[in-house]
Every structure is written in structure tokens, then in C-alpha cells.
Image (cartoon, grey):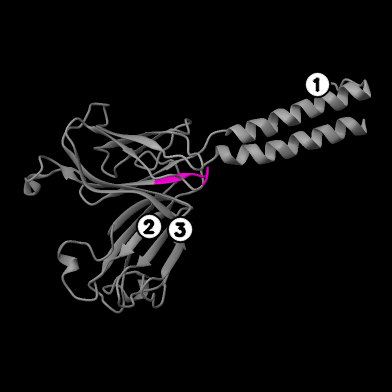
Amino acid sequence: MKTIAIGSIFAVFALMMVVPSAFADHANVPVSMPAGTQVQGCETTNECYIPAEVTIDVGSEVTWTNDDTAAHTVTSGTLEDSDSVGAVFDSSLVLAGKTFKHKFEEAGEFPYFCVVHPWMAGTVIVQEAHADNGGMMDGDAAHVTAMTMDGSVMITVEADVPMEGEEMALTVEFTDADGNTIEHVNFDISATQDGTEVLAEMGQHTHAGSAEYTTSALSSDSAVDVQITMLGIGLPGEEANWSGPIGETISLNVVPEFGPIAMIVLAAAIVSIVAVTARSKVIPKL
């Protein structure tokens, strides 16, 4: 019976190695504090933090990077409500080139600003995981969907399974709530893996409601976070007439499936059980 126990332990160990890769980690969404924001003016285009509004699931993390030469803060609340200032998070001074991270553990809308340069303002919208109004994932690791907050646009990402050393091809599709293709969608798209940017395409336009992209070579098999910022629906050059959700960022998480190495480990575990069972001449009861 000891041989059976040993084989079973091997199998459990193999499964522990394989199973976690089939599930998505919560997204880590990047936000930039761009150059020049220490001078007023960025508030007129809502670009003091880029993107100024992000939508994430409970348990996800936002990472702010100071790409300016001046120090800034990321402080929850608003000046109009003094009791709210710093009540949820406060970075203190973030020096040039440094980052601040905060993990959001509850749903809600969290406005924030820079106490040094108060015209800088942004918002993090946190929703329950797999909520119907965004961040929703289906069971297929390479097929992820999300909906904008107003329910007018469904975004679908079809992607290759992330593999170390390989580029990842992905297709983005835009449809309405009834599944009809939305034409003339304007958007930004970026993707990160393990905190490293692997795709960044700004000011994109799709006439037919879908577009294809390829990331740079991935550094691991871990999940890839895709961020899509809606710029509006309409013809290029007619921005004043664009409609739909504008400025909303949707995050989608592409997770790995069972990779070849993991399958080899699992197969080895099964062979091990068969081998030790054969040697012991004991057939375990199911």
C-alpha cells in the first residue's frame, strides 16, 4: 500500500503544478502620470492620469507610474469632501520614475487626485468579479469578453494561449448587446505580462468592428492583461460627433491553458502510478 500512496502523492504534486496555470490571476492595470502634468492644462483633455478612468474587478491591482519629472501623489477622495481624502489609499510622494500600487478589495467607485497638483484627477471603478457589466470572462482561456459600463458595447478578445518566447496573436471584436457588429470604433489597446508592456497601439480605428494585433515575444506562460480604452464611435476626423462610451478602459485577462510541459508532468504522474501499482500487484479500489 505504501507504493500506492507514493504514486498518489506524485499525482497530487503533479496536479498542483498543472492546475494553477489554468486559472487567471486578477488583472494588474497600469496608469501613467505623464510628463508635463505638473503644469495645468492636462485637465482640459482629462489626461493628467492616463487612462483617467479604469474599470477592474474586485481583487485587481492598479499600478501608477510617475512618467513626469515632478513628484506626484495618488490620493483617494476629492477636495470637495475633506473626510474622503486619503481614506482608502494614499501614495504619499511618488518620485519621477517610481510606482505606487494598490489592490482593490471591495466594489465601488474610487475618485483620486494629486494633493500637490490638485487639477490632476482620476477614477477607479471596481466591480464584483465576473459582473455582467464588464470584466466578464467565459470558460475558454483564449476567449474573453467584457461589456462597457453602459452596456452598449461588448468587447471580445480571441487570443492565442500565452507561451514563453512566442508572440501572441489576438483579435478584438466590438458588438452591441444583441451581438450585432459595431462599425467605426476608435480605441487604444495595450497589453502587459508580469508588469511588462508587450503591446501598445494608440488611436486605433476599425471600420468593420474587428482588428488583429500581435504582441512582442512573451517572457513567460503567465496571463496577459489586455486593456482597451474606448475613444468613441464614429468616423476618423469627426471626433466632435463621436458617440458611445468615451474614455472608459476595459481590462481583459488572457490566461494560459494546460501547457505541454504541464501535460508531460501529468502524464509522468499517471505512468508512475501505473508502474508502482503493477510492481505491488495491488489494484487500488476506485
Q: Is residue 159 left or right of residue 42?
A: right
Task: State whether residue 58 is above or below residue 2.
Answer: below
The location of residue 120, given as percent across then percent down, is 25, 70
Q: Which of the two discs, 1 and 2, sits closer to the camera?
A: 2
Q: Nearer the viewer, residue 78 or 51?
A: 51
Q: Which amino acid is tagged 1?
A: Leu
The location of residue 161, given as percent across then percent down, is 47, 35
Q: Which amino acid is tagged 3?
A: Phe
Query: Disc 2 on helix, strand or loop?
Result: strand
Using the rendered view, name the quadrant where residue 262 is placed: top right
Residue picked out by circle 3: 104
Residue picked out by circle 1: 286
Q: Earlier in the sequence, mark 1 or mark 2?
A: 2
Can residue 110 be seen here? The reply is no
Q: Which of the two discs, 3 and 2, sits closer to the camera?
A: 2
Q: Nearer the viewer, residue 217 or 54?
A: 217
Task: State whether residue 65 is above or below residue 275.
Answer: below
Q: Which amino acid is tagged 2?
A: Pro
**Magenta portion: prevailing SS class:** loop
Q: Which mark is residue 30?
A: 2
Is residue 202 magenta-colored?
no
Q: Is residue 147 left or right of residue 144?
A: left
Gap between marks 1 and 2, in whole Å?
A: 49 Å
Using the rendered view, name the quadrant where residue 180 is placed: top left
Q: Earlier in the sequence, mark 3 or mark 2?
A: 2
Can residue 95 be seen here? The reply is yes
